[in-house]
Image (spheres, rainbow, N blue to C red):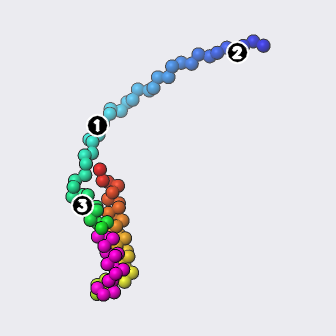
Amino acid sequence: MPKSKVRKKTAYTPPADRRTPVKVRAAGPSHPIYKVVMFGLMLVGLAWLVVNYIAGDKIPFMADLGNWNFAIGFALMISGLLMTMRWR
């Protein structure tokens, strides 16, 4: 049986890019205040929940809030956690 012919492949040439490259400014590190606010929100949220568990019924405005204390505490902690995504 005769051997089949080998086809030659042409070298791949990528298409010319028509767009001009845009320089992206390198993002520097976050400001120190950003870190303080970020960690502060997480700690204040944690402290809010701990105080609610320990003395929530003895503090008048916390007793009036009832179960909303959980929403406040977790909202503070989650907002600090969301800030970590933009921390450099």
Assign a secondary structure to mark 1: loop
Task: Give the residue type that dot 1 points to.
Answer: Lys
Disc nearest the viewer among 3 and 2: 3
Q: Residues within 10 Å of mark 2 (few under 14, many from 20)?
A: few
Q: Main secondary structure of the magenta part?
A: helix
**What residue do we see at 37% from left, 74% from top?**
71
In the figure, 71 relative to 58: above or below? above
Instruction: Determine which residue is flagged by label 2.
Output: 4
Instruction: Determine which residue is flagged by label 3.
Output: 36
Observer-nearest of 47 and 34: 47
> Quarter holding the N terminus?
top right
Per the rendered image, the range of residues in magenta is: 44-59
**What residue do we see at 33% from left, 64% from top?**
79
Assign a secondary structure to mark 3: helix
Q: Position of residue 86 (x, y in %)?
A: 32, 54
Task: Give the residue type that dot 2 points to.
Answer: Ser
Asked whether the viewer can see residue 72, the reply is: no
Give the tally of numbered discs.
3
In the figure, 77 relative to 63: above or below? above
Q: Dividing the picture into quarters, in which one does residue 76 lie? A: bottom left
In the orientation shown, which residue stands out farthest toward the front? 54
Asked whether the viewer can see residue 79, the reply is: yes
Mark-to-mark CA distance, 3 and 1: 31 Å
Label number found at residue 23? 1
Q: Dividing the picture into quarters, in which one does residue 25 lie? A: top left
Q: Residues within 10 Å of mark 1 (few under 14, many from 20)?
A: few
Is residue 56 within the magenta segment?
Answer: yes
